[in-house]
């Protein structure tokens, strides 16, 4: 494998690639050889980080439901043990559970590997890496890939050991205890969710455990839960809280079974969404608003860090209604989390970092983006509200102002050096906005160009940015009036038509 091909496997702080045939003529690049070398490189990297010899290194390995998981897992285990390292085989697991295997007392492994590609198509797969400080950063992945590419590994005289454990049950027990302690039910002490009907849609990913190992032990009626069995072909819908079909499926289940709450997870359970008893979606800005209301009740005045595309109404809700501070930052869950950590390190308080995609991380939980933990916080609040008999979950966000129109367009950049081309467009757009009296450059913007429009010119905003990893320029547009998004888009088209290597066809079709 040449250097360029190794670099293609890096997707920010993760490894992602093609693991099996099935879509077009995509060439498999997550071969046993490639995966094995990356696993060896992580082992060597851990030895360097911990100062331990390889025969003392313990690495937990888990996977979601993807069809290629077993092959990749076997290659990883064989490679780590060939160096003399020890593997704890966790089997089907969630990404947050694999991090927790590095910190829960009695386990505390040196590192963890989760085999997953989140919500991507069934032929994709990848790896996420953890140590007890959290997930690895982009620079760490680059270093590991360079070690893999160099391929200078020594087979150990003594092969390392393999131990199989049911770690997802250990992780689930932590959630159960968290909810019991959080609710403090005066009657149903061990089953604080008794009397609630809660349906779960796991999308045939790794989240089915939440029904049997969390909700049922807590007393909840889970009748109507669906797609709990792991199936890497994802036959029912994409396991993604942002997917329209996925959300329709859980909304339908809530209404049909008259549930108090619906829960939906992505494939590896680091993201979640919800549906209230009336079938209202609680995802994206609504999910951020809901968890912000819970966090700010516990930590008044805290800074809530979100990604760059959150709505104006959410900012107002956090600051005016809840008395918190809203800090919009860059897209990318790792960017949002690291920004919250930076704020805390500098002496201010930030207890929540969350993206509109559903990646939510709390300070109290290692700033781990954990969909199941996020839902646990919501369940605790729901149970407490029932005891107080004064509010429902949805009423917590009743004052959230939502835009009349929201649009997103993803424009392909058609040149090989897409980054330079995109950066030139953004630089030119900054000049264009500053010279146009109908637009105002948004203050405190950390990604791309965000421009604001008054009521006469669209009553909203746009954000144009360059994708973190792909040759794309996404545009998000929000307006508080009907037809406002088209007014704002028309302004953009007038500017973007100057760039022949940018595919603006979808935006042009919307304007016309």
Image: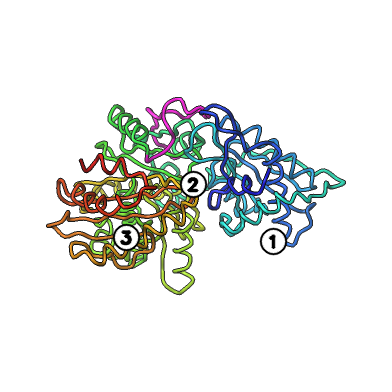
Residue sitting at the far bottom: 347
Residue carrying label 2: 175
Q: Secondary structure at mark 2?
A: helix
Figure disc tally: 3
Looking at the rendering, which quadrant does residue 447 occupy?
A: bottom left
| Dominant SS in magenta | loop
Q: Residues within 10 Å of mark 2 (few under 14, many from 20)?
A: many
The residue under label 1 is: 49
Vertical position of residue 482 compared to residue 27: above or below: below
Q: At which x and y percent is residue 72? A: 65, 36
Q: Position of residue 278 (x, y in %)?
A: 24, 37
Residue at 73% across, 54% down: 44
Q: What residue do we see at 45% from left, 44% from top?
A: 190
Looking at the rendered structure, the secondary structure element under dot 1 is helix
Q: Nearer the viewer, mark 1 or mark 3?
A: 3
Q: Could you tell whether 145 is left or right of 200 in the image?
A: right
The C terminus appears in which quarter of the rendering?
top left
N-terminal-most mark, 1 or 3: 1
Q: Is residue 143 magenta?
A: no
Residue 75 at x, y percent in the picture:
70, 37
The residue wearing badge 3 is 429
Residues at discs 1 and 3 in contact (Cβ within 8 Å)? no
In front: mark 3 or mark 2? 3
Q: Which secondary structure lies at badge 3? A: helix
User: Outermost residue, top direction?
Assistant: 235
Between circles 1 and 2, the one closer to the viewer is 1
Residue at mark 1 to residue at mark 3: CA–CA distance? 43 Å
Q: Which mark is residue 2?
A: none
């Amino acid at each position: 494998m040449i250097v360029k091909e190794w670099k293609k496997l890096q997707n920010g702080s993760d490894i992602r690639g093609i693991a099996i045939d099935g879509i077009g003529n995509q060439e498999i690049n997550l071969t046993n050889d490639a995966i094995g070398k990356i696993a060896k490189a992580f082992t060597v990297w851990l030895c360097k980080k911990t100062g331990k010899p390889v025969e003392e290194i313990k690495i937990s390995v888990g996977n979601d439901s993807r069809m290629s998981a077993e092959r990749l897992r076997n290659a990883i285990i064989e490679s780590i043990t060939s160096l003399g390292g020890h593997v704890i085989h966790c089997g089907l697991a969630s990404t947050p559970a694999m991090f927790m295997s590095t910190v829960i007392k009695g386990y505390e492994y040196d590192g963890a590997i989760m085999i997953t590609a989140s919500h991507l198509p069934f032929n994709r797969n990848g790896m996420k890496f953890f140590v007890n400080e959290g997930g690895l950063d982009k620079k760490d992945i680059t270093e590991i890939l360079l070690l893999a590419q160099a391929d200078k590994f020594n087979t150990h005289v003594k092969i390392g050991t393999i131990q199989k454990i049911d770690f997802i049950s250990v992780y689930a027990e932590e959630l159960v205890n968290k909810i019991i302690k959080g609710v403090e039910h005066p009657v149903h002490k061990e089953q604080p969710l008794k009397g609630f009907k809660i349906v779960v849609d796991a999308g045939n990913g790794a989240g089915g455990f939440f029904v049997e190992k969390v909700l049922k032990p807590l007393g909840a009626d889970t009748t109507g839960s669906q797609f709990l069995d792991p199936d890497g072909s994802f036959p029912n819908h994409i396991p993604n809280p942002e997917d329209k079909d996925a959300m329709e499926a859980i909304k339908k289940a809530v209404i049909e079974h008259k549930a108090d709450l619906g829960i939906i997870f992505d494939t590896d359970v680091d993201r979640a969404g919800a549906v209230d008893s009336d079938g209202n979606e609680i995802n994206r800005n609504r999910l951020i608003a809901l968890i912000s209301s819970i966090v700010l009740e516990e930590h008044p005045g805290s800074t809530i860090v979100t990604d760059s595309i959150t709505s104006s109404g959410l900012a107002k809700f956090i600051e005016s209604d809840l008395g918190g501070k809203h800090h919009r930052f860059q897209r990318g869950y790792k960017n949002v989390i690291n920004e919250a950590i930076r704020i805390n390190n500098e002496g201010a308080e930030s207890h929540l970092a969350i993206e509109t995609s559903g990646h939510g991380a709390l300070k109290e939980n290692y700033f781990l983006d954990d969909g199941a933990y996020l839902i646990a916080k919501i369940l605790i609040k729901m149970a407490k509200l029932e005891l107080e008999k004064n509010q429902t979950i949805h009423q917590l966000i009743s004052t959230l102002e939502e835009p009349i129109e929201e649009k997103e367009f993803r424009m392909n950049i058609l040149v090989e050096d897409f980054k330079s081309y995109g950066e030139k467009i953004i630089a030119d757009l900054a000049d264009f906005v500053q010279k146009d009296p109908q637009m105002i450059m948004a203050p405190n913007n950390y990604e791309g160009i965000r421009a604001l429009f008054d009521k006469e010119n669209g009553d909203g905003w746009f954000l144009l940015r360059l994708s973190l990893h792909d040759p794309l320029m996404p545009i998000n547009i929000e307006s508080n009036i009907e037809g406002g998004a088209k007014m704002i888009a028309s302004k953009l088209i007038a500017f973007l038509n100057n760039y022949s290597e940018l595919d603006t066809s979808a935006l042009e079709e919307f304007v016309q």
